[in-house]
Amino acid sequence: MAGCFITFEGGEGAGKSTQIERLKRRLEALDQPVLVTREPGGSTRAEEIRAFILGGHAKHLGPFAEALLFAAARIDHLDKTIVPALERGTHVLCDRFADSTRAYQGSAGNIDKALIDQLERVTLRGSKPDLTFILDLPAETGLARARERQAGRGESADRFEGEAASFHHSLRRAFLSIARDEPKRCVVINADQEPDEVEAAIWASLRERLPQLAQSRAPDEALRPLDVA
Ligand SMILES: Nc1ncnc2c1ncn2[C@@H]1O[C@H](COP(=O)(O)OP(=O)(O)OP(=O)(O)O)[C@@H](O)[C@H]1O
Ligand SMILES: [Mg+2]
């Protein structure tokens, strides 16, 4: 059985990484095989592109060239990491994916939607997520969380966290609009609540949308008839 492809989207500090780890633990407790990965990155070449983009080196090229770099990274990530995992029956939990390109470069970066659509088609080649959680909260709340986390680790803001407030507001609108356009694939989760509550909302929605994942996967031994000879 092929694995399920689940992506987590939302603005800065929405709680994507936190919730992916929690979902991974829940699935593993049910013996479901899981791979956690992220964008940009998730493969050797794509991680090199990630360092270039998030280091701010692509900013002066403009949002379209940035979108092309994300696409190049995504192609390698799909080919080397995501598709092979799905084919061997492992579920893939991905921290950001193509909707982030739509929101960051498309809506907030003002790239024409038709162009983003075309780019997405040739990049994904049919590998659309089965389910996407859009973690929604006011931009200010997410940015404050991200800043607090960075202060704790002695880090500075990355390429996108440094953008103006209007950029982050348009990101939120963009993610909500994607969810409205594709209600079968996307679920909006209220991320402005305690981590346990966000986790429960994600789990409830996963049980409804992909019930086969929320069940224990019997170990191979249990599936074999008893050897009575
Ligand atoms: N529901 C929550 N309430 C309060 N704080 C939270 C919540 N979820 C996560 N946090 C904290 O907020 C910070 C950001 O969370 P996290 O790193 O999971 O977000 P993210 O969406 O992955 O952010 P980024 O886009 O920067 O990668 C972390 O310090 C995390 O511990
Ligand atoms: Mg994160």
Image (cartoon, rainbow, N blue to C red):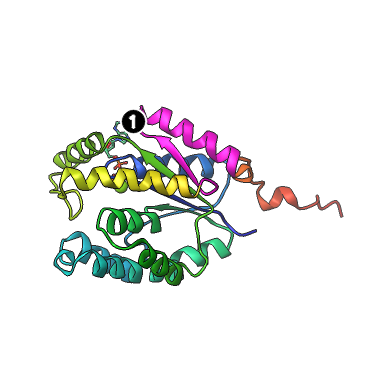
The quadrant of the rendering that contains the C terminus is bottom right
Place residue 105 in its image quadrant: bottom left
From the top left corner, tell me how far across and down residue 68 is, in percent.
30, 70
Q: Is residue 124 above or below residue 175?
A: below
Left-right relation of 226 to 118: right
Left-right relation of 82 to 65: right
Q: Is residue 223 above or below residue 2?
A: above
Question: Is residue 75 visible to the viewer in this orientation of the structure?
Answer: yes
From the top left corner, tell me how far across and down residue 84 is, in percent.
51, 67
Place residue 90 in its image quadrant: bottom right
Q: Secondary structure at mark 1?
A: loop
| 200 is within the stretch colored magenta | yes
Please name the residue shown 32% across and 63% down the image. 112
Please name the residue shown 27% across and 41% down the image. 13
Q: Amino acid at mark 1?
A: Asp
Looking at mark 1, is its residue's CB closer than 8 Å to ligand 1?
A: yes
| 186 is within the stretch colored magenta | yes
Span colored in magenta: 183-209
From the top left corner, tell me how far across and down residue 83 is, in percent.
50, 66
The quadrant of the rendering that contains the N terminus is bottom right
Frontmost residue, 132 versus 167: 167
Q: Is residue 196 above or below residue 83?
A: above
Frontmost residue, 89 versus 62: 62
Left-right relation of 101 to 130: left
Frontmost residue, 64 versus 44: 64
Question: Is residue 12 visible to the viewer in this orientation of the structure?
Answer: no
| The furthest residue to the right | 229
Frontmost residue, 171 versus 96: 171
Q: Which residue is mark 1?
A: 192
